[in-house]
Image (cartoon, rainbow, N blue to C red):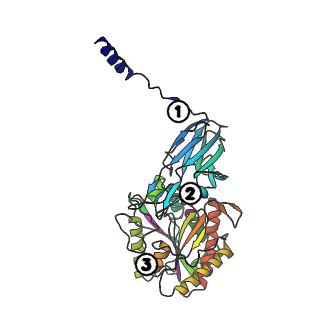
Amino acid sequence: MKGNMLKNLTLFVGMFLPLTLPAADKPAENKTGLEFIDTSIENASPLWYEFAADGTVVVNLLYDHERNSPNRAAGHFHFLLHAKPGSKLTLEFKNLDNVWNGRPGSVAKELKAVSISENGRDWKVVPTEILPGNRVRLAVEMPGPRLYVARIEPYRLSDLDRLLATIRKNPLVEITSIGKTVQDRELEIIRVGNESAPHRAFIRARAHPWETGGNWVAEGLIRRLLKGDADAKKFLQRYCLYVMPMANKDGVARGGTRFNLQGKDLNRNWDKPADPQFAPENAALEKWLEKMVAAGRRPDLAMELHNDGSGMLHISRPAVPQLEQYLERMARLEKLLRQHTWFTEGCTKATFRNPGSLGDGWLERFGVNAVILEFNCNRIAGLDDFATGRNWQTFGEKLATVFYEYFGAEKP
């Protein structure tokens, strides 16, 4: 009896004693100067982190998923390091194994550089080290107590708001709300120029939240057309520009990688009417396009802007009437891009088809000469320089001339 009472007492007391983990199961100690990884900043990516035995900070990205699909993505990261000044930190990024169009893949091989900033405004690009097992390592030295780290230079909702505020009162600009996102954020179309101009160009950016290059290009183009000099006036006599600057605002706000908050890829399913329940962003844009077509203002050229690890002009080839004329126009567009911008990567092969993308769907369903332009997120070969917001803005500025000459060969 006494033995049983002693045993029960030992078990009872043990419930309140600190748990001693076996050495192999103990979390690694923080041997670095890192104090905290802050994900409360605007456009921050969801993640969790831990410390390896050698002091490496292991950063685990969190996936976003596509509805009714095995597709998943984790390529965006943006966070703020809090650490002792002068600390030398080694970060290792994991969970980079994505699924794209049902096929396993990884963004690790594309992640050759990242952007860092002390103040979140002035960014510089630093190289990474690609490791076996779809991992990427970044070594940084803290210049002060805080350091922002992002896959590519961020373009946030607040950056777009600042742009809209600076151009809103310009008599050449009209900003129209065409609908709302899943979380009720306004979706804008920016018109630059006279809607009665002989030609109309359309640009959409940020269908995928991590791909900021399109925003920088769009801003560079808009600011060039509003410069007020002789060339800008000449450009706007020939064409009017329409821009949807940020298609996936919810994803940008929440630090997502590819899909909207209902799990839809906004650069897919354009081969059929958009679903307003799951893709209200696309439904709003489709309704706007239908009104433009009905009013006799169909866009003469549409460009969907993206980022990836290579850069390419994606020319799709659906079975449409006058496909050869479309391909001739796209060949002329490619030639002008090479002539007036730093574009060098080339276009997709003659067998390329990307059903459901905006470039494919707008051509097939609405007769719009549409194309998808990807920008290399690491390096700009034509400049022999890193991919930065400033370099993408420069591309946008030069795009004003490309459109002018492209439409110069077209009949109104």
CA gap, disc 3 and disc 1: 65 Å
Q: Can you see residue 78?
A: yes
**Tag in front: 3 or 1:** 1
Mark before the other along the chain sequence, 3 or 1 = 1
Query: Viewed as shown, does residue 156 lie left or right of 341?
Result: left
Please tell me which residue is depicted at 59% across the width and 84% down the height of the picture. Answer: 328
The N terminus is located in which quarter? top left
Describe the element under mark 1 as helix, strand or loop: helix
Identify the residue under disc 3: 292
| Magenta-drawn segment | 187-215
**Tag in front: 3 or 2:** 2
Query: Viewed as shown, does residue 286 lie left or right of 45?
Result: left
Q: Label 3 is placed on what type of residue?
A: Met
State the residue lying farthest toward the left: 1
CA gap, disc 3 and disc 2: 38 Å
Q: Label 2 is placed on what type of residue?
A: Val
Identify the residue under disc 2: 107
Is 273 situated above or below 295? above
Query: Viewed as shown, does residue 60 lie left or right of 277?
Result: right
Identify the residue under disc 1: 24
| Nearer to the camera, 166 or 163 | 163
Please tell me which residue is depicted at 63% across the width and 42% down the height of the picture. Answer: 90
Mark before the other along the chain sequence, 3 or 2 = 2
